């Protein structure tokens, strides 16, 4: 009787092992892939937002370098 409980205790954790059950492991890997993709998408969007085009800057151009230059 003691051997039966010992065998039961050894095989029970194997059912909960990540590598033993392909259903549990594939579900876990799927959700990890979804989380990683969402994190990549949010991080990339934030980086693009930080480096966005902020408009045309006001540049001072000397009058003598214009298409029709103005001299003194």
Image (cartoon, grey):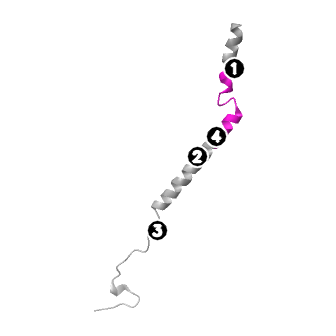
Give the spatial CA distance, label 4 vs label 2.
10 Å
- Determine the residue positioned at 64% across, 40% down: 29
Q: Where is residue 23 drawn, in percent x and y?
A: 71, 35
Instruction: Please give the residue where the numbered disc 3 appears in the rendered image.
Output: 53
The image shows residue 7, relative to residue 67, as above or below, that is above
Q: Position of residue 55 (x, y in %)?
A: 44, 72
Tell me whether circle 1 and circle 4 mark residues in contact (CB < 8 Å): no
What is the secondary structure assignment of the residue under circle 3? loop
Residue 69 is a magenta residue: no
The answer to whether 1 is drawn above or below residue 63 in the figure is above
Q: Residues within 10 Å of mark 3 (few under 14, many from 20)?
A: few
Q: Earlier in the sequence, mark 3 or mark 1?
A: 1
Give the structural element (helix, strand or loop) at label 4.
helix
Q: Which residues are magenta?
A: 12-30
Disc 2 designates what residue?
35
Q: Which residue is mark 4?
A: 29
Q: Earlier in the sequence, mark 1 or mark 4?
A: 1
Q: Is the residue marked by circle 4 packed among few (<14), some (14-19), or many (20+) residues within 10 Å? A: few
Picture residue at 63% right of the left edge, 43% below the top: 31
Q: Residue at x 69, y 20 (%)?
A: 11
- The label shown at residue 11 is 1
Q: Earlier in the sequence, mark 1 or mark 2?
A: 1
């Amino acid at each position: 009787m003691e051997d039966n409980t010992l065998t039961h205790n050894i095989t029970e954790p194997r059912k909960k092992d990540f590598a033993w059950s392909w259903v549990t492991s594939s579900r876990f890997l799927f959700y990890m892939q979804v989380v990683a993709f969402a994190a990549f998408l949010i991080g990339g969007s934030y980086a693009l937002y930080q480096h966005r085009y902020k408009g045309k800057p006001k540049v001072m151009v000397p009058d003598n370098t214009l298409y029709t230059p103005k001299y003194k």
